[in-house]
Image: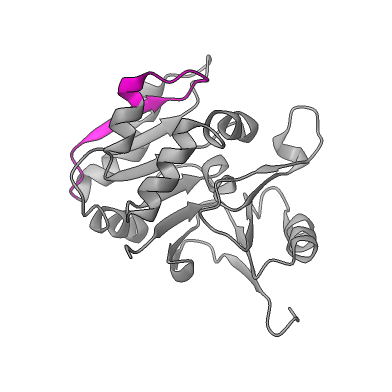
């Protein structure tokens, strides 16, 4: 069985230095690093993408595939994603990322690649997609109402909060942890990241992440 490598960040890019190096070291297969993003009408991805790619390039990654998400991805885009050596899910409006990825051919490919040892990194919205449930806090919603949607299931038996410090997510994380009876809860501050291998926390960098863990039925 291939090791499953997951990198989660509490805010936007860039990668933290050590986790960037670790991510690149996990690129064991041929193919590009795929960067998945929802286009924003008020910003240019060409200007934003180097915040991701510069650090990756400095650590040895050379091939990138920029994938603007939509409801109707082209067959060529899906083919390139299926041949990727690493996958990065960017941040933005979480509900739209969930709509374009979870339960779609894109999500299926991500799950398959992850199972076959391809490292997956999620930033903010991208991180929220990785558990079984994608729990979107009210502060991240235009209508100010929290949502619980289906996630990718890359990190089962866990709940995640991002922007843990600036969004004051302590209560939301704890309540989700109790309600779902998850084994783990991760509160990721901005500028922080964690690396999980086969579901086990291996490394963290930046402001210390909050970790909730069930022990014998107790927290």
In the picture as drawn, the residue positioned furthest to the bottom comes out as 216
**33 sits to left or right of 206:** left
User: Could you tell me residue 78's position as x and y percent?
Assistant: 36, 28
Quick check: is 74 in the magenta stretch?
A: yes
> Considering depth in this image, is 170 or 102 the residue closer to the camera?
102
Q: Which residue is drawn at 26% across and 38% down?
A: 83
Q: Can residue 196 be seen in this view?
A: yes
The image quarter containing residue 62 is top left
Q: Is residue 89 visible?
A: no
**107 sits to left or right of 64:** right
Question: Quick check: 215 above or below 25?
Answer: below
User: Could you tell me residue 20's position as x and y percent?
Assistant: 32, 54
In the picture as drawn, the residue positioned furthest to the top comes out as 41
User: Could you tell me residue 19's position as x and y percent?
Assistant: 36, 58
**193 sits to left or right of 62:** right
Q: In which quarter of the image is the N terminus?
A: bottom left
Quick check: is 205 in the magenta stretch?
A: no
Question: Quick check: 127 above or below 82?
Answer: below
Q: Which residue is drawn at 42% across and 33% down?
A: 36
Q: Residue at x 68, y 77 (%)?
A: 214
> Considering depth in this image, is 210 or 199 the residue closer to the camera?
199
Q: Quadrant of the C terminus?
A: bottom right
User: Could you tell me residue 22's position as x and y percent?
Assistant: 30, 60
**27 sits to left or right of 138:** left
Question: Quick check: 77 above or below 17?
Answer: above
Q: Which residue is drawn at 31% across and 45% down?
A: 86
* Circle count: 0
The image quarter containing residue 44 is top left
Which region of the structure is painted magenta?
60-77
> Considering depth in this image, is 186 or 54 the residue closer to the camera?
186
């Amino acid at each position: 069985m291939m090791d499953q490598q997951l990198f989660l960040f509490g805010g936007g890019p860039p990668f933290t230095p050590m986790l960037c190096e670790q991510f690149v070291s996990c690129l064991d297969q041929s193919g590009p690093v795929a960067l998945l993003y929802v286009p924003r009408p008020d910003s240019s991805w060409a200007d934003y993408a180097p915040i991701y790619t510069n650090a990756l390039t400095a650590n040895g990654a050379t091939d990138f595939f920029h994938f603007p998400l939509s409801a109707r991805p082209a067959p060529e885009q899906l083919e390139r994603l299926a041949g990727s050596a690493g996958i990065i899910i960017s941040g933005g409006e979480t509900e739209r990322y969930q709509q374009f990825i979870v339960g779609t051919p894109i999500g299926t490919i991500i799950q398959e690649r992850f199972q076959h040892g391809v490292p997956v990194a999620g930033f903010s919205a991208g991180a929220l997609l990785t558990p079984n449930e994608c729990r979107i806090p009210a502060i991240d919603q235009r209508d100010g109402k929290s949502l619980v949607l289906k996630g990718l299931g890359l990190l089962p038996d866990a709940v995640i909060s991002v922007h843990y410090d600036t969004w004051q997510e302590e209560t939301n994380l704890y309540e989700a942890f109790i309600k779902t009876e998850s084994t783990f809860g991760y509160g990721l501050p901005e500028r922080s990241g964690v690396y999980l291998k086969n579901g086990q926390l291996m490394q963290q960098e930046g402001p210390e992440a909050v970790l909730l863990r069930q022990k014998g039925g107790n927290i």
